[in-house]
Amino acid sequence: MRVLLTGATGLIGSAVLARLRDAGHEIVAVSRSAAAARRLPEGTTCVALDIGTAVRPADWLAHLAGIEAVVSCAGVLQDSPRDSTAGVHIEGASALFAACEQAGVRRIVHLSAVGVDRDASTAFARSKYAGDERLMASRLDWVILRPSVVVGRAAYGGSALFRGLAALPVIPRVAGSGPLQVVQLDDVVRTVLFFLDPKAPARVALEIAGPERLPLDQILSTYRCWLGRDRARFVSVPGWLAGAMFRLGDMLGLLGWRPPLRTTVRCELARGAVGDPAEWMRLTGIEPRSLAVALAGEPASVQERWFARLYFLKPVALSVLSLFWIVTGLIALGPGWRAAAAIMQEAGAAGAAALLVAAGAVADIGIGAAIAVQRTARRALQLALAVACAYAVLGAILLPRLLSDPLGALLKIMPIVVLHVIALAILDDR
């Protein structure tokens, strides 16, 4: 079968892609990021397309040639300069559905979210349900799957956040979190493959949820045990502090990042993620696994422990490096101006000392600002690495006395360089 798969580089989409390939299907994989699309398995037909802007059926028709079924896994959590919930969940999805009708592609398996038909308190939930309604109004053989929080061996979104929180020395507890029926990624993927069969039931909307309603504390304790950590210690976070953390996440979203702690997550946690999996289980015969059973079947190895411990250190490292370069530049332009100019004069650049100090300070500020922006962070870190090494080499050549400075003016560049390398190594989100 030739299948068009949207959201092919996401948590669910990448797992579906792997299983479809194993089953011998031919896949046309759609991803917004051309770079991510190039990393898809060899032999996969890759299409770089931003669903949020592909809002006309004509944008899709060329990619539907020979397609027998569509799996729609694309989704975004919250509006930002990079993401539009309405664009992806409603306009882009509707254009795809209309194009399928025009191209004669009948079967479409569409991933939504549990509870969006009951409580649409966020733009995420409202747009998801609006997209569901557009599909249900079509003439297609549609299947809408509404999973709860999806967790699995791969870590992104909820599963990544759970691991990061579970690895903290003390776990923050945010009041008002509802119960969660976490569902295993493998169970979701099995469901997608089941409904791709032309003989499978169609025009059904199913809730995909795990067998247990668990409080967030218990989920985190289970992950902590899986990671081999000692018993979890929880500390209640005041409402005002929790609100500030989620709003900070929104601010980072404006810079292009997708932090796990944003106001949409807070609303979704308060709503909880529970559903009735009975009809799903009856139609597919799938018995969802509990979180504890699933984790016991895949013991944590060193990469899981490293990932969990580094999860919250990544934004800390990027923030520190961004501030380091910005503050360094501001100091050179302000209280450190005379000292910086004196160093330049000592190095033999007396005639251009002021110009060099100003240029270096502006460059430092620009590097720090670029590190803070997701789209430019990698290039900025690479440039910062080169500049830091240049500072060290030129300083050692032109001012060798700095090598014996008791405060380690040049030697302290070495750990800074290492931190840049580490930040580059862990920069990827998925």
Image (cartoon, rainbow, N blue to C red):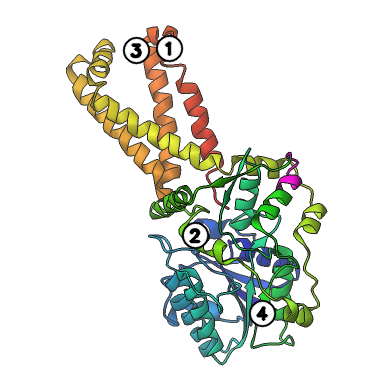
For the record, the magenta segment spans: 224-230
Q: Where does the N terminus fall, quadrant-wise?
A: bottom right
Q: Secondary structure at mark 2?
A: helix
Q: CA distance from mark 1 to mark 3?
A: 18 Å
Residue 51 in view in this figure = no
Q: Amino acid at mark 2?
A: Ala
- Element marked by disc 1: loop
Disc number placed over residue 206 in the picture, else none = 4
Going from N to C along the chain, the mark reached first, 1 or 3, is: 3
The residues tagged by marks 4 and 2 sit, at their Cα atoms, a distance apart of 32 Å
The residue at 60%/80% (across/down) is 67
User: What distance separates the C-alpha of mark 4 from that of mark 3?
Assistant: 70 Å
Q: Amino acid at mark 1?
A: Leu
Foreground mark, 4 or 3?
A: 4
Viewer-nearest of discs 1 and 2: 1
Q: Nearer the viewer, mark 1 or mark 3?
A: 1
